[in-house]
Amino acid sequence: MFTQHIEMISRLRHNHLVSCIGHCFECCPDDSTIGIVYFVFESLPNGTLRSSICGGGVRLNWAQRITAGIGVAKGIQFLHTGIMPGVFSNHLKITDVLLDPNFHVKICTYNLPLLAHQNAGLMGGAAVSSNGLKSNIGGRENEEEKNDIYDIGVILMEILVGRPIMSQNDVMAVKDIIQVSNKMDDTAQRSIVDPTIIKECSTESLKTVMDICLRCLSDDPTARPSIEDVLWTLQFAAQLQDPWRHDSHHIHRLSDSNQNNLQEQISRG
C-alpha cells in the first residue's frame, strides 16, 4: 500500500496540479525501515495567485483572473473525478495556487493519503490535510466536494476584490457587500471590484463571476454548485468578457469613499 501511494503521487499529472518529479527515502539506521519520504516537486517561479492579485508586482488583469479561476476549477475537477478514489476536502487556499512561467495556475497541495498521513508541509509551507485517507473512505464524497466548492468561492472573492481574505469574518463581511451590490446597478457592483481591473471587466462577465462566487459560498452545502457547474459558469464568464471592448460607457471610477467604505467594512467584519 505504501509503495502504491508513492507511485500514485509520482504519476499524478494534470495541467493544473504541481507535479512530483522525484522522491527519496530516509531509512532508520537500526532496521533499515523507511522513516521519512521526501518528495521533490516542480519549481514554479512566479509565486502564488494571491501575490499576482494583491501584491506589489505584476498583477493579473480581469481576463487572466477568470482564466486562473478556470484553472483552479479544472484542477479540483480532476482530483474529484479523474482519479480513483477521488480526492476531496483539499482545504484549498489561494496561497496553495502557484503560477508557472506562463502564469498558468497549478494547485500545489492536495489531499492524497500519503501526503495527508505525513502531514507534510509542501511548497514553502503550504499545509496538507491530515484526514485524507479516512475521509475518502468514509462515504462522504458529496459533502466533501462541497467543502472544496466553498474554498473556490473564497478564491473567487479575492479575485474580485483584489485584497487578502484572511479570516472567516472577512469572508462574511465581503459576502454581505457582494450580495447587496449584486442586486443593484452596474456602478454599485463595480464599487467593490479591485480598482486595478475596474475598467477591464464587462458588466455581464463581472455579474456572472459574482453570482457563482455567492453560490459557492452558500451556508447550505447542498445549495452549492457542482464543480462542473462552477467550471462551466467561469468559462461562460470568459466568453462574455472576450468580445467586450473598451468603451467610455463602461468606465466607472471608484470613489475614494466607496473603496474606503469597503475596507472599513472588511476590517469591522
Image: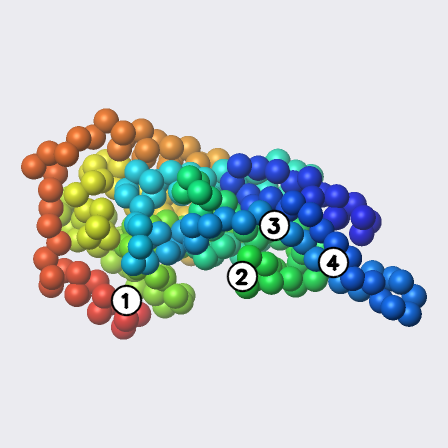
- SS for dot 1: helix
Distance CA(mark 3)–CA(mark 2)? 11 Å
- Tell me which numbered mark, 1 or 3, is placed earlier along the sequence: 3
Q: Circle 2 is placed at which residue position?
A: 124
- Amino acid tagged 3: Phe
Residue 36, image x, y percentages:
76, 62
Spatial CA span between label 1 and label 2: 28 Å
From the viewer's perspective, is 258 left or right of 218?
left
Image coords of residue 253 (percent x, y):
10, 50
For label 2, the crowd category at 10 Å Cα-Cα, with few meaning under 14, some 14 to 19 and many 20 or more, is few
Q: Which residue is mark 3?
A: 41
Q: Position of residue 194 (x, y in %)?
A: 24, 53
Looking at the image, which residue is at 41% across and 33% down?
232
Q: Residues within 10 Å of mark 1 (few under 14, many from 20)?
A: some
Separation of disc 1 and disc 3 at Cα? 36 Å
According to the picture, the residue beneath numbered tag 1 turns out to be 266
Amino acid, disc 1: Ile
Task: Please state which of the two labelled residues, at mark 1 or mark 3, is closer to the viewer.
Answer: 3
Q: Estimate the spatial distance between the alpha carbons at disc 2 and disc 4, rounded to whole Å.
A: 17 Å
Q: Work out whether residue 187 or residue 3 is closer to the camera in this orientation and state it.
A: 3
